[in-house]
Amino acid sequence: MLAMNFRGPYRIRADRNRPEPKIEHPYDAIVRVTRSLICGSDLHLYHGLVPDTRVGMTFGHEFTGIVEEVGSGVQNLKQGDHVLVPFNIACGTCPFCKQELYGNCHESNPEATAVGGFFGYAHIAGGYDGGQAEYVRVPYADVGPMVIPEGMDIEDAVMLTDVTPTGYQAAEMGGIRKGDTVVVFGAGPIGIMAARCCWLFGAGRVIIIDHLDYRLEFARNYAKCEAYNFKEMDDPVLFVKKATDWLGADVCIDAVGCDASGSKLQSITGKKLLMQAGSATALHWAINSVKKGGILSIVGVYGPPWNLVPVGSLMNKGITVRANQASVKRLLPKLIDHVMSGRLDPKGIISHRIPLEDIPDAYRMFSEKLDNIIKPLLIPPKAFAV
Ligand SMILES: NC(=O)c1ccc[n+]([C@@H]2O[C@H](COP(=O)([O-])OP(=O)(O)OC[C@H]3O[C@@H](n4cnc5c(N)ncnc54)[C@H](O)[C@@H]3O)[C@@H](O)[C@H]2O)c1
Ligand SMILES: [Zn+2]
Ligand SMILES: [Zn+2]
């Protein structure tokens, strides 16, 4: 089959001779991919920032597909079902899944000290091959996949596998109260969706900060928020203070993670020398920009082992920190309602539709932020008609 093949940092191949996945366990399903997406989290792998990312892996944790085959134990899915598949691989029965912490499943990742299993990620997330391919093996098939609701656009459906729940959960974890000022760091798909969702929770003012003008312009229109370029500021923290009567934001959201720009020290120690798990610049700014007693919501991804952040400010300001991978399955019913009723428009964030065989170009374009790219959608050759 055709699938993405990771050959090392910045080296991706569209491989036409990958073996098709097979049922390995009674609870598996094999899904023929109809759409998949590239995520900012894939860029952390592409840039070599995630430990134990193995050559030969197929990435892709955001996909929809048609069920081709199910294992003997699968009860909720049948051949021919068109499903959206959450990026978390979850067993559904461990203590963490029972608390609806589907991103922290204790069974789906042998290294389960923190995250559970994900599709198409490094072996620290279980090492499962992902959906930037024609076929995927989906473990615990009765738990994650959901039949795409009747009448839902396939592009909205694929955006429900990660971006929409993650943006929504970023706002939710912010504990936003009516009238709050929220500052979102990062105007990628996640930050843009988070900014839009802040209004659903009653925010009074939403500010997004990035350094890419085309994304800021998109965010202004799509999320109806204020948008500012940190390259035009002397100091982003001072900027937020000035904008909030010197109090700081009620809520800050980090939607950047370990690949942040903006600080030479962070970038050199984190991204060049790999002395810390990537660069924590946005997190640093968020901690210093939130008000005393405020809430910091972290959805930007950081990996092991650790990062340089001002923990003293965190402690002495009495900041509440909430962070996690999104728990997609928990949020789906609510988000389907928001999408079907028109309050959220996930597919509006997709900027590029690219044949799967051109995946090396898609990664390069997304990594280098070329052609005003925001979110690239991949279409396998036989799925164009779907
Ligand atoms: N928690 C989850 O479940 C979850 C799910 C999906 C993605 N993520 C993470 O969310 C983050 C964003 O994902 P994305 O797909 O939007 O990625 P993206 O790479 O498209 O966007 C990141 C944006 O951050 C901007 N940026 C860089 N440094 C910055 C700084 N110091 N301050 C403000 N903005 C800065 C970049 O210009 C870019 O526009 C990534 O870390 C990704 O791994 C988390
Ligand atoms: Zn993702
Ligand atoms: Zn579990």
Image (cartoon, helix red, strand yellow):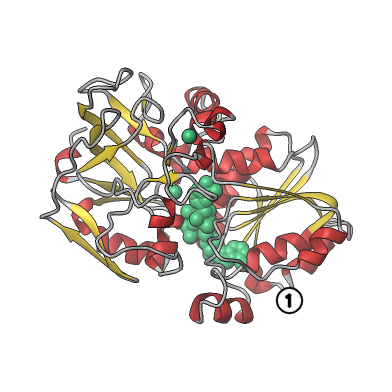
Residue at the left extreme of this rendering: 17
Q: Which residue is mark 1?
A: 234
**Image height of 283 relative to 184, above or below:** below
* Image position of 69 (left or right of 281): left
Q: Does residue 192 show up? A: yes
Seen at 37% across and 63% down, the residue is: 53
Which one is in front, 277 or 12? Answer: 277
Seen at 18% across and 39% down, the residue is: 22
Residue 174, percent from left and from top: 71, 43
Q: Look at label 1 and name its amino acid.
A: Asp
Q: Does residue 371 show up? A: no
Seen at 54% across and 46% down, the residue is: 325
**Image height of 179 relative to 316, above or below:** above
Tell me the quarter of the picture where residue 144 sits: top left
Q: Could you classify mark 1 by the number of other residues whose Cα lies within 10 Å: few (under 14), some (14-19), or many (20 or more)?
A: few
Residue 190, percent from left and from top: 53, 49
